[in-house]
Amino acid sequence: MGMGTVFVLMGVLAAGATDGRDLLRELVGRCAGVSSIDAVIEQHIRYPGAPPEVFRGRYRADAQGRFRIDYTAPSVQRVLHTGAALYWYYPADNLLYRIGGGGGSAPAPGARPADELMRRLDERGEVEYLGRRLYGIFTLAHRFVVRGDDPRVRIEVLVDSRRGVVLERRLLDERGREIVTEVFSDYDRTQGACYPRRIDVRARGERGVVRSTTVYRDARINIPLSPGLFAPDFPPNARRRLYRDR
Amino acid sequence: MAGRCRMLLAVAALLVAVDARAVVISRIVIVGSSVDIGLAELVAGRTGDLSDADIRAIGVEVTRRYHEAGYVTCHVARLVARRDGALEVHVVESRVREAAVAGVDGPAARELAALMLPEPGEIYNRIVVAERARFASAALGLSSVRVSAENHGDGADVLLRITALVAPRGAVGFGMGYGPRYGYAPVIEYARPAGGGAVRSRAEIGFRDGYLRQGIAAVEFDGRDRETDGGGLLLGARYRHARDVWESMDREFLSNAGEAFAGYGWRFGSASLDCTFRQAMSGLERYRGNWYVDNDSRAQAVYRIADRRLLLDRRRASELAFSASGGASDLCPKGYAMAAASGRTALVPVPWLFVVPHFDAWYATSAERYHWRYVFDETLPGRSDDFTASRWKHTAGIDLLFEAYPDLAMAGPFAVAGWYRNEDDEWRTAVVCGVRCTVQFRGVSIAAAWSWDVSGPLSRGSVTFSAAGSL
C-alpha cells in the first residue's frame, strides 16, 4: 500500500467523520432566498376515514418567519403567525385561538424549507452526511441525518445535488418508521429565488395517517409587504382561547 | 420543543439579570431545587473571577442537567450575583398538578390516573412518566398510553393529558373482487391480537358461469410481536375447494385440499423469514379422468424485505420476496420443488406521478397440473378466455400512475411482458397493456383495471376489479 493510498484512505475516513453541517449549508445556500411571498394557496387535507377537505386562500410570509393565511374556503378564517405567537381566527364565530407560548417559533409553511432547516441546524446537534442516492428517476440527492436532543428521533433530509433544494424531509423514530414526511416539489426559480410550489405532508396520528397537499399559485416573490400585515389586529371583543402545547 | 422553549426563556432571563462586567464569585447557591441530580457537584469549583458568559454557562449547564435527568420542564429562571460574592441560581421546578384521562372512563380512568400520577405535586419527569405509561399499559391491558404535558393554568406547573388506546378486540376486513379465473369473489377477514402476536382468519369464494370456482377458509397465527424484532411461532390451517381447468384438454377438474402448517418466523427491521412445514391432503376429482387422493408433505421458506410498515405513504413501498419449497406427495413420490421471486418498487420523480416497475418469477419441477399456476392471472392479465397453466413463468412490467386528485384517485397505463412454458411444454411470450385506476375514500380502496394481450390473437381483453375496506 503506497503513501498516496494511505493519504486517500485517511481523507475518506476524515470525510466520513466530518459533521455534514457545512456541506448542507453550502448546498442549500445555492438556492437564493425568499424574503417575502404573496401567493394563492390551495390545501387538500385528509384525515383518516374522512372525506377530503379543501382549503383555499391567500398566503403571505416574510423572512422573519411571520406568515398570514386568509382562507376563503371552506369558510373565512385567518391564520396569523406574528413571529411570537400563532393565532387562528374564525370571524363567523368571533373566536380567536392563540396557539403556543410567547416565545414560540412555529415555522412558516412553505416559503423556503431550507430556511427553517438552517434555523434548526443552529439549535440542534450533529448533522451526518450519508452520501448520495437516486431520488425519483433522474435526480441524485445528498442524504443527511440531523440528530437533536431526543435520541429516539432523527430527521432525514434529501437535498437535490444539482439545484441545492430540499426535496424531502422525514422525521423517523428509532426503528426507522416515518412519523412525519414532507415532500417539496415543483420549485419555482423564475423570480430570482426558489421556493416549492407544492408541499406534501404526511403525519402519523392516533387514528391513522393525516395527509395534506399544499399548492401555491400566482406567487409574487420578494415584494414589499405592508408592515401592518402581521399585526394581531383582531376584534377586541373576540372570544379568546389559549391552546398551549409543550 | 418544551426543552427548547424553556432554554430560550432561561437565556432571556439571564440576559436581564447578569451584569456585563466580570464579578468575583466566592460560592454558588442553588435556590428552589428539590431533586438530587448532582447540582452541587456540577457547580463545585466554578467560583472565582467570572465573566457574564461564565455565569450564563452555569445557568445553562444547570438547566441541561435537569433536562438530561428527564425534568424537561424545569429550568433556571434567574441568576443573581450578590454583593457578598454569592451567585444565586434560581431554579423553577414544574410540578404535576392534575391528570386528565381520555380514551377510557369510570374505574379504569381513575385507576389509570392513579398509576400515572400517584402523588399530585411531584416534579414532572418525562422519563418517569414514560415508564409509568408502559407499566400502566401492561397492567390495564391497554394497547398504549400516550401522555402529553400541558401548562396548568398560566403558571409553570403541568397538566398531564393522558390518552389511553384500548387494545382492539379485532378488525374486520371485507372486500369484493372480480377476476377472469375465479369470477366474482367476495372476501371477509378477521384479525385480532393474541399473545403478543395476531390471529387472522379469512374466507373467500369465487363464482363464475354459474359455478363455485373457488372457496377458501383459512386461519393463521403469527406469534411475532408486531412492534419489536424477534421470532415467533407460525401455525395455521387452510381448506380450499377449486374448480380448475386444463386449457390443452378443454377439461375441468375439482380439488378439495386441507392443509395444516407449523413453523417459526423471524422479523428484523424490514426483513422477515418464515420457515414452515406443511402437510396437506387433497381429493382430486376428474383429474386426468380419474379420482385421486394425494398426501403431500412440504417444507417452505419465504424471505421478504419490505418497507411497507415503515412508510406513511404505502404507495411508495418497495418489496422483494423469495420463496422456496420442496416435498413429496403420492402423485409425486420422487419429490418436487417450487421457487418464486417477486419484487416491486415505486419511483416518484414528482408527487403526481408514480412509476412502478415490478417482476414476478415462478418455477415448479412438478409435472402435475394442480401444482401449476394460471398464466393469465393477476400477474399477467389480458386474456379472460385463456386458462393455460404453466410451471415456468416470468413476468416484468411497469405501471404509470398519475394523480387525478391528491391522495384520492390515481390512474394510468401499464404494460407487462410475460415469458412462460405452456401445458404442451412450449415456450411462449405475451405482452399485455392496459389501464388501471385506484380510488381511496373513507377507508375503502377500490381498484379496477382493463387489459389486453397485444401480442397474441384477438381476445376480449380482461377486466379485474377489487374493493376493500375494514371496520
Image: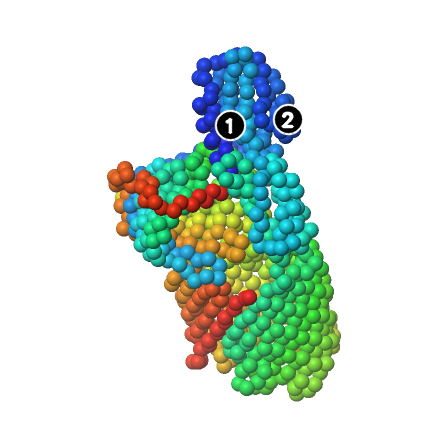
Give the mark, 1 or 2, whose residue is nearer the N terminus: 2
Which picture quadrant has residue B402?
bottom left
Is A207 displayed left or right of B138 in the figure?
left
Task: Tell me the SS state at disc 1.
Answer: strand
Q: Residue furthest bottom?
A: B289
**In terms of depth relative to the viewer, which is nearer, B118 or B466?**
B118
Q: Position of residue B108 (x, y in %)?
A: 64, 54
Is B296 displayed left or right of B83 in the figure?
right
Is B71 displayed left or right of A23 in the figure?
right
Q: Is residue B379 above or below residue A159?
A: below
Q: The disc labelled 2 sits on which kind of residue? A: Gly
* Residue B38: assigned label: 2
**In terms of depth relative to the viewer, which is nearer, B232 or A161?**
B232
Residue annotated with mark 1: B77
The crowd level at tag 2 (other Cα within 10 Å; few <14, some 14-19, many 20+) is few
**In terms of depth relative to the viewer, which is nearer, B341 or B172?**
B172
At x 48% / y 74%, what residue is drawn?
Answer: B464
Which picture quadrant has residue B303?
bottom right
At x 42% / y 54%, what residue is drawn?
Answer: A212
At x 71% / y 83%, what residue is drawn?
Answer: B292
The crowd level at tag 1 (other Cα within 10 Å; few <14, some 14-19, many 20+) is many
Q: Residue furthest front?
A: A237
- Whether residue B266 is visible to the viewer of this picture, yes or no, is no
The residues tagged by marks 1 and 2 sit, at their Cα atoms, a distance apart of 19 Å
- Whether residue B206 is visible to the viewer of this picture, yes or no, is yes
Of badges 1 and 2, the one in the foreground is 1
Task: Tell me the SS state at disc 2.
Answer: loop
Q: What is the chain letter for disc 2?
A: B
Q: The disc labelled 1 sits on which kind of residue? A: Ala
